[in-house]
Amino acid sequence: MSAPSRWMSGALILVLVLVTRETGAFLLDHLYHLDAHASHGHGHANSTILHLLRMVKQCLVHFEVPHAGPAATAPWMPPYPEPPPTSVELCALRGFQCERHDVWTADGYALAVIHVVGRLGAPPAAAGTRAPVLVQHGMLMSSDAFLFRADDDGNLPLFLSDAGYDVWVGNYRGNAVSPHVHATLSPDSQQFWNFSWHEMGLNDLPAMVDHVLQQASAPDLFYIGHSMGSTGMMVLLSSRPEYNRKVRLASFLAPVAFVSTLRSRLFRQLFAIAPGIKAFLLAHRVWNVLPRSAALHRFVDKLCLFPGAGELLCDPVAFEIAGRSPEHVFPYYVPTLLAYLPAGTTIRILEHYYELARTGKFRPLGYGTGDPNPGPEYNISAITAPVALYYSQNDYFVHPPDVDRLAAKLPHLFHKFKVPDATFNHFDFLLGRDGKHLLYTEVLAMMRLKEAEGAGEHNQLAPLSSPLHLRLRNT
């Protein structure tokens, strides 16, 4: 058995453990005994898996039971806040004032939107004097994923605030920051979690866009979406044409519309058994998949900081999901990051991305699978707002040819930029060591360029080789 195959087995086990601790412990117990028996006849290959299982099981054995208190803290675990600071508190720790706004969608969900007011102690800017920017997270993330970085090079919302923009950071329905509140549905019901990024695009984003524009007294805004943040906005702009006039420039970081190639072996194996995973989750009434929890944080933290486990299991899993990129990782961020990720997703979101990869078509979930009201593919050519695409060679989820395919369908492609670093991966758009210099300055330059052309003028697109464009790129 090859080395990748050895740790891949452990990775799949870890994924199952993360879904629910009780089910994970049951599987581990049976797999551990099966693998111990098999290792007698297969030597080193199975002994490596056995070693991984032993480490995971030891973490579970010593894992905190309810109300166990300090006994769960291992000597190699650094201290971390519990509960971790909120998005508003993270801003204050970084020297900024932020406010939380609750927004309601047309279909009854409550969302949280974080407003970056500005530097602490600075006089507040008058409404309408700064161009608004809405920044939107990807799958399993929240506003915290943008705001937890403390270094000057990695916090995109605060970087844009310092650049003079009125910054708002959104949260999709059902994540760890948005309240799990609905006008009529209980969060304990399956119906509450019956949504994918289709509903997020049609309902969440228009609610947030309209709220930001009303608060900022502005006719349009800049939009920056990472991964699923780009997917949702493409759903909105292709389905509700009136919102194209409300977006001055849509900047998509690692845009997900087409997935023709799954470069991640882990995703390929998970997708191969996706129907079984869905049936397993439904049978165990798991509607909110991978929610944020202190217990989950403590377990993953202990496992990944357990001597040897990080190198054998946790690092490879992260790199297999996003792309190998050790040069861009801050090791001391891991405990903090694990306090905020994962932030929850749903079966339908996972299923929708699975269908996107399986069919190669960007369309609503259920089309072609017996849905009584199937819809056609999202009409990307109907997106009249200018769009800037930012991608990387080492992104295992967003393949450059798929970005090329998306770019060819966009009628108003404003800019297309590949991050000039061969190791930059899907997570590095938010978490990379050199995000500011490799990416954020480019995003800012294109926003400045769009401002220079005139607010809301979607049809006056400067050539990508224009002197102004080149000058702004080098600032």
Image (cartoon, rainbow, N blue to C red):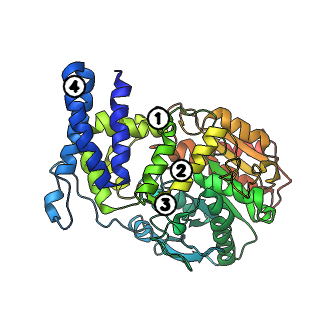
What amino acid type should be assigned to the residue bearing mark 2?
Leu
Rounded to the nearest angstrom, the CA distance separating label 3 from label 1 is 27 Å
Asked if labels 4 and 1 touch by Cβ distance under 8 angstroms, the answer is no
For the residue labelled by badge 2, is the local secondary structure a helix, a strand or a loop? helix
What amino acid type should be assigned to the residue bearing mark 3?
Ser
Q: Position of residue 131 (x, y in %)?
A: 68, 66
Rounded to the nearest angstrom, the CA distance separating label 2 from label 1 is 14 Å
Rounded to the nearest angstrom, the CA distance separating label 4 from label 3 is 42 Å
Rounded to the nearest angstrom, the CA distance separating label 4 from label 2 is 34 Å
For the residue labelled by badge 1, is the local secondary structure a helix, a strand or a loop? helix
Q: Position of residue 284 (x, y in %)?
A: 40, 57
Q: Which mark is residue 39?
A: 4
Q: Which mark is residue 350?
A: 2
Does residue 431 appear in the picture of this structure? no
For the residue labelled by badge 4, is the local secondary structure a helix, a strand or a loop? helix
Q: Residue at x 34, y 21 (%)?
A: 1
What amino acid type should be assigned to the residue bearing mark 1?
Gln
Q: Would residue 85 appear left or right of 344 to someone viewing this image?
A: left
Asked if labels 3 and 2 touch by Cβ distance under 8 angstroms, the answer is no
Does residue 37 appear in the picture of this structure? yes
Instruction: Give the label, 1 or 4, closer to the camera.
Output: 4
Rounded to the nearest angstrom, the CA distance separating label 2 from label 3 is 17 Å
What amino acid type should be assigned to the residue bearing mark 4?
Ser
Q: Residue at x 59, y 66 (%)?
A: 167
Q: Would residue 241 appear left or right of 471 to someone viewing this image?
A: right
According to the image, label 3 marks what residue?
A: 142
Q: Residue at x 34, y 62 (%)?
A: 293
According to the image, label 1 marks what residue?
A: 269
Q: Position of residue 444 (x, y in %)?
A: 63, 52
As rendered, which of 100 and 369 lies closer to the eye?
369
